């Protein structure tokens, strides 16, 4: 499975099997985490066998079950932490999909005090991502259309349309899709709209767009 194919296959999962992440899958995941940290300056880490971080809590679309493993999206406490966490966290989400693992972004419904105890000095926590083997497959949710999320002057090139279509498949808080793409003078730009967790969402949709378009995009915050 390619990363672009993972965009189509991925759906958020909240119910997991009691099955450890180990062997070759664990090694590949840890190597990708290390690569993301080296490129981003973040300090993302995999936490395993912690059943209490989200136990008994609800996400927007249902309760978590056996969410014992999660990616902790931490890094230097800077103004750009949340966008970076979205971008590099989503890279790990899609890579995990290629390994047969399922995931769910969790920005609010977890025990922050418990997770933050492991932060280093000068670090902040943006979110966590549950990860593991799905007990039940995730389901697609309603999506906005290309026209609803774009401002385009003239005809948009195929690469821009491919990027936006990939971005429309990105997970966002409460499935709000609070972002806007612009294409003017041959340049693509994305900006967040007002709403909860939109900077994390901005990083997520930025990564999706760049995978779909195979081009970078300018960010307007």
Image: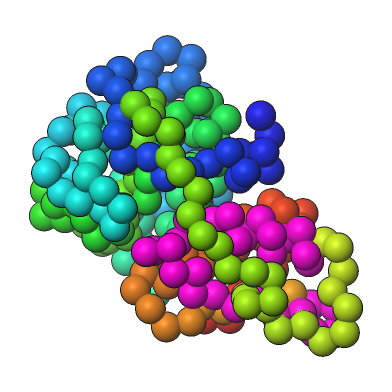
Q: Quadrant of residue 48?
A: top left
* Residue in the picture at 30% in, 23% down: 17
Q: Residue 37, image x and y in percent?
A: 47, 46
The mark total stands at 0
Nearer to us in this view, 84 or 20? 20
Nearer to us in this view, 147 or 37? 147
Which residue of the protein is positioned furthest toward the top in this rendering?
23
* Residue in the picture at 30% in, 29% down: 16
Nearer to us in this view, 80 or 132? 132
* Residue in the picture at 57% in, 30% down: 98
Viewer can see residue 134 = yes
User: Which contiguous range is marked in magenta?
Assistant: 160-187
Q: Quadrant of residue 198?
A: bottom left
Q: Residue 107, image x and y in percent?
A: 30, 58
Please name the colour scheme applied to the rendered image: rainbow
In the rendered structure, the answer to whether residue 106 lies left or right of residue 112 reads: right
Viewer can see residue 87 = no
| Residue 181 belongs to the span the image colors magenta | yes
* Residue in the picture at 58% in, 55% down: 169
Quarter of the rendering occupied by the N terminus: top right
In the rendered structure, the answer to whether residue 140 lies left or right of residue 220 reads: left
- Look at the picture and state if 95 lies above or below 44: above
Q: Residue 30, image x and y in percent?
A: 44, 29
Q: Residue 196, image x and y in percent?
A: 34, 73
In the rendered structure, the answer to whether residue 27 lies left or right of residue 148 reads: left
- Look at the picture and state if 97 lies above or below 153: above
- Look at the picture and state if 87 lies above or below 68: below
- Look at the picture and state if 158 lies above or below 9: below
| Residue 76 belongs to the span the image colors magenta | no
């Amino acid at each position: 499975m390619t990363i672009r194919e993972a965009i189509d296959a991925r759906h958020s999962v909240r119910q997991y099997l009691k099955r450890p992440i180990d062997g070759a899958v664990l090694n590949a995941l840890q190597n990708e985490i290390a690569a993301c940290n080296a490129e981003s300056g973040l300090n993302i880490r995999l936490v395993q066998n912690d059943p209490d971080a989200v136990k008994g809590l609800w996400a927007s679309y249902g309760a978590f079950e056996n969410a014992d493993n999660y990616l902790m999206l931490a890094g230097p406490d800077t103004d750009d932490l949340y966008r970076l966490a979205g971008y590099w966290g989503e890279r790990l989400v899609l890579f995990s999909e290629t390994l047969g693992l399922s995931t769910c972004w969790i920005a609010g419904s977890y025990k922050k005090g418990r997770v933050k105890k492991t932060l280093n000095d000068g670090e902040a926590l943006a979110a966590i991502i549950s990860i593991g083997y799905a007990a039940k497959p995730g389901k697609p949710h309603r999506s906005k259309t290309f026209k609803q999320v774009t401002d385009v002057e003239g005809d948009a090139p195929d690469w821009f349309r491919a990027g936006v279509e990939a971005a429309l498949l990105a997970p966002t808080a409460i499935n709000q899709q609070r972002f806007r793409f612009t294409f003017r003078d041959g340049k693509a730009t994305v900006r967040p709209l007002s709403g909860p967790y939109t900077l994390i969402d901005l990083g997520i949709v930025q990564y999706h767009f760049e995978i779909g378009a195979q081009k970078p995009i300018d960010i307007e915050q």
